[in-house]
Amino acid sequence: MNPHLRAANEAELNAMQLDTDPLADDTIARILGPWPSGMPTLDAQQWQAIATVNRLLGQWSSNAALQHWRAEGEGVTPAMAQALQDYVAQGQVLPPWADHRKIERAEQLFMQHGALSCILLFCSSLPECYVIPDLSSVLHTTGQLEQHTEYRIRATAAMIFPVMLLGGLTQPSGSGVAQVLKVRLIHATVRNLILRGKPQDARSRIRDNGVLPPLPLTGAAATSMHQVLYARGWDLAQGAPCNQEELAYTLLTFGYVFLRSMRKLGMGLRPADEEAYLHAWNVVGYVLGIDPALMVQNMHQGESLMAQMQARGRAQPVQPDPRPALGAALMQTMSQAIPWSIAKPFPPLMTRYLCGAQTAKDLGLDSKQIPWLSRCAFWCVMLAARVVDDVVQTMLPRFSITRALVRIVGYHFMSRVLMNQTRPLQLPDQLLNQMDDTMASWSDDPHAPDWLNRLEDRFTTAGQWSLRRKAPAGTPT
């Protein structure tokens, strides 16, 4: 770790834009081998290898499952098996500086804030993720956020929950390390597809000043995410896709941005708790293959690095700008989860409040286009809640109307998107059961008086949801 992170100079961050993840990149390169010239046919061995790897990833059901895992089954070649087993053996090891007490405290904080954690993730962390044009450009190419917004949101939750549930990073029964290693290998696959080979070899293969030209797509290939990524083309002048700077920036959105949002809602944590939360996400970043030199240990460092990275990203615009369409898709999905008409425009207003005017502008979130009645309702509710909290907390420090309001919206969002019974999260049964139990425990706020919890229950359906597909009638449950 870098205990005294300083502002990196432009040359250092420029170098990080070309750095990726040698372990994961080498693993995927060993599995896929060299790509043929031109656009591969639909029956190319690389597409079959990717499908086989995706099937094998489903076997990583827990941290314990990684310890003696072997790649076996149909389509698994000796080279593929050895590459994956080497990756798992090295990747599952936590950093020597991991502090289990801090990780446990971070898990407790996530559990305590429950539904609030979810709404802050989707109204602050994810929107900030899409500020950097290169990150948005890749998502725009795959259509993951515009055409499959709920899938993208649910995939993010499928990593965050296993990481932050009790024991997710440190216990064999947890699943955090297993889920993060899956995401790390997906990042490497995306890089290999876009650069048509191992990123570390890209410059020697790409001519025309580092530009990889796009390839024509026709027929069924035009609808396949993998083929679309392979054909999109890339300019290495903007760095490698999913590079170290972008990965570190994304890490900031899950740790620093969440804590910043808590502060803005008047529910900031103690400095020691903030540092424990950042530490846990730094451990996640290490398992994800992020250079520790780009990790922050406190909010001051997070604020400085976030501002620096955002300024760099905004100085390198991508045309056409994909961010407004991505922002609109994200806000629309969240608005559809809110049952009250007057409150449906609240997500972009909350995002603007938590992330600031510049981020809202980047994502095309113009508050003037929102009906004035909804704007007035949002700001009146927020202002009144903060005033009541400031007054009552002088006598009852744990009281918070603001937390209750955000929890109510968070419950509705989870019930409509994350807990939709007809589209269960793609996670092992054991983990789904753990998440069900955890979210059921969020029905009552441990920081709130009983009467406030009863009031919350009137506006939520807490305790009636399930992450799992609903059983047919007559099936034992």
Image: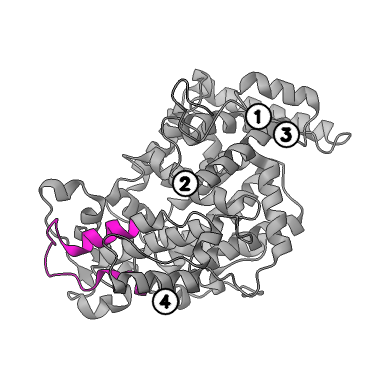
Amino acid residing under circle 4: Ala
Render colour scheme: one colour
* Residue 438 falls left or right of residue 8: right
Whether the residues at callouts 4 and 3 have beta carbons within 8 Å, the answer is no
Q: CA distance from mark 4 to mark 1?
A: 44 Å
* Residue 407 falls left or right of residue 367: right
Amino acid residing under circle 3: Asp
Q: Position of residue 14 (x, y in %)?
A: 41, 73
Q: Residue drawn at (54%, 29%), measured in percent from left and top?
A: 477
Q: Position of residue 312 (x, y in %)?
A: 44, 63
Q: Residues within 10 Å of mark 1 (few under 14, many from 20)?
A: some
Q: Residue drawn at (42%, 71%), measured in percent from left and top?
A: 85
**Closer-to-camera residue (39/253):** 39
Which of the marked residues, 1 or 3, is nearer the chain's N terminus?
1
Q: Which residue is mark 1?
A: 405
Please name the predominant secondary structure of the magenta segment in the image. Answer: helix
Q: Which residue is mark 2?
A: 427
Identify the image quadrant of the N terminus. Answer: bottom right
Q: Quadrant of residue 235?
A: bottom left
Find out whether residue 47 is within the magenta segment. Answer: yes
> Could you tell me which secondary element the residue under label 2 belongs to?
loop
Q: Position of residue 197 (x, y in %)?
A: 25, 71
Residues drawn in magenta:
25-54
